[in-house]
Image (cartoon, rainbow, N blue to C red):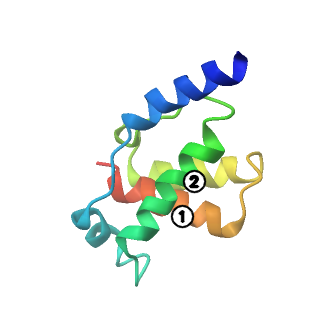
Amino acid sequence: MRNLLLALATAGCSSALTVPEAGHVDRVRSDWPGTALDDLARGRATYIQKCSGCHTLYLPPSRSGSEWREQVARMAERAHLTASQTSDITRYLVAVAP
């Protein structure tokens, strides 16, 4: 039952997250050259998967790009993120943040 409730809660939060679009790719190409839409989609999926297990997902507009960089860097070790996952999540959040 607990797993079902967690899955439903996560689904509700994840549906509110911005789905990356081509314009978001352009925002981060200067910091992450070669970024593609698939990279941002992977970052979104990783954010949902790795972060929602411990807390409610924060919506990207809740922080600036620089605040997201700091937040993800602080949480990476605690969340047991690989360097690649950390980069993917950061790139997604920076791309869709205001």
The kind of residue on which mark 1 rests is Asp
User: Is disc 2 surrounded by few (<14), some (14 to 19) or many (20+) residues within 10 Å?
Assistant: some
Q: Does label 1 or label 2 sit earlier along the sequence?
A: 2
Mark 1, secondary structure of its residue:
helix
- Comparing marks 1 and 2, which lies closer to the viewer? 2
Q: Position of residue 79 (x, y in %)?
A: 73, 47
Marks 1 and 2 close (CB-CB < 8 Å)? yes
Left or right: 43 as drawn, with respect to 82: left
Q: Is residue 61 left or right of residue 10?
A: left
Question: Which label belongs to residue 67?
Answer: none
Q: Residue at x 71, y 57 (%)?
A: 81
Give the labeled residue for mark 2.
Answer: 46
Marks 1 and 2 sit apart, C-alpha to C-alpha, by 7 Å
Q: Is residue 43 visible?
A: yes
The quadrant in which residue 18 appears is top left
With respect to residue 74, does 5 lie above or below?
above
Residue positioned 54% across, 24% down in the render: 8
